[in-house]
Image: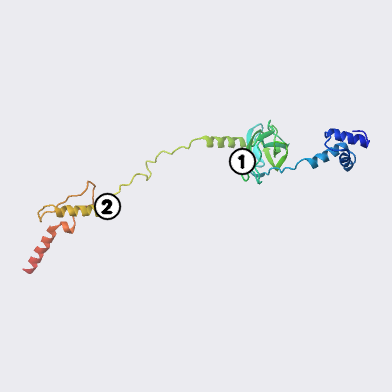
Amino acid sequence: MGTTDKEVLVGEFQKLLGDQLDATECAFFLDMNNWNLQAAICSYYDIQQPRTSLPSMSFVKDVTVGEGESVPPNTKFTKTWRLQNSGEDSWPSGCCLKFYYGDQMTHVDRVMSGSLGPGQMTDISVDMVSPSKTGIYQGQWRMITPSGSYFGEVIWVIINVDEGGLLAVTQQMSRFEFGRQPVQNPPNPFGSSLPKINNTMESSQLNDIHSQHVNHYNNSSHNSDQVVLHPASSQQLPLHSYITPESSPKSTNVEDESQEMMIS
C-alpha cells in the first residue's frame, strides 16, 4: 500500500481482519513492523495462529537404487525408500512424499503414504525414468502434511546415467525371482535317501513278547523232549526270542547224560 497515513493503515488493517482488533491493537502491530501493512498482518497471524506440532520422520535406508547407482539412459526404474515415524504421535491421514528440489525424473510430484503409528516403518516407491543424457542426477523429496507443512529429513535419489548401467536388468530379474514359484529338484537316484530297513525292536517290545511266549509254553501240554516254538504275535522276531533256558528241557537231559558218563 503506497500511503503512509497511519489512520488509513489502521483502517485497512481492521478491514482485512474483519474488525477482530480495535484501532489501538492494529496500531501496535503496525508500529512493531514500521507501519508496513503486509508485515503487520503476517505478525498478527504468527502470534494468533495456534501452534501445532509437526509429525516426525527419519530416513532408514534405500531399499532400491543406492546413491550413485548406474542406470542406462531412458530407462524405467523404481526408487524405494524406507521411512520411520520417529515421533510420539501418529502421522495424520493424507501425508505424502513430495518432490522438493533437483531432478524430478518422473511425471508425478507426490506419492501418498497414509497414516503411520509411532515407531512404525513404511516403504514408499516412485516410478522414475532416467534422463537421456549421461551424467549424475539427483533429486530431493520430503514428507508433507495435508495442510502443506514439510516435516522430517530430506531424502535423496542419486543416479549415474551410464550406457553400461545394469540397474534396469537387475530390477527386472529381482521381480522375476520374487514372483516365481520355487522349483523342487527331482530325487537323486544315486543319493543316500533310500529308506533303511529296521531289523531291531525296542527292548520293551521284546520283553513283552518273550513273556507271552513263556507263559504260553508253560500252560500248554507238551513232551519234555520237544521244544515248542509258538510266537505270540505275527511280527518277525529274532531267533533268541523263541528259545529260552526255561523252554529248552533237552539241554538239561544232555547235561545229565554227560554227568552219568563221567561217573561211570
Residue at 72% from the left image edge and 40% from the top image edge? 150
Residue at 7% from the left image edge and 66% from the top image edge? 260
User: What kind of colouring is applied to the model shown?
Assistant: rainbow
* Residue 62: percent from left, percent from top: 63, 42
Question: Which image quadrant: the N terminus?
Answer: top right
Secondary element under disc 2, as helix, strand or loop, is helix
Question: Which image quadrant: the C terminus?
Answer: bottom left
Residue at 19% from the left image edge and 57% from the top image edge? 244
Dots 1, 2 in contact, CB < 8 A: no
- The residue beneath circle 2 is 205
Which residue sits furthest bottom? 263
Q: Which badge, 1 or 2, comes first in the chain's sequence?
A: 1
232 relative position to 224: left or right:
right
Camera-side residue of 142 and 16 = 16
Residue 122, numbered label: 1
The type of residue carrying mark 2 is Gln
Q: Quadrant of residue 9?
A: top right
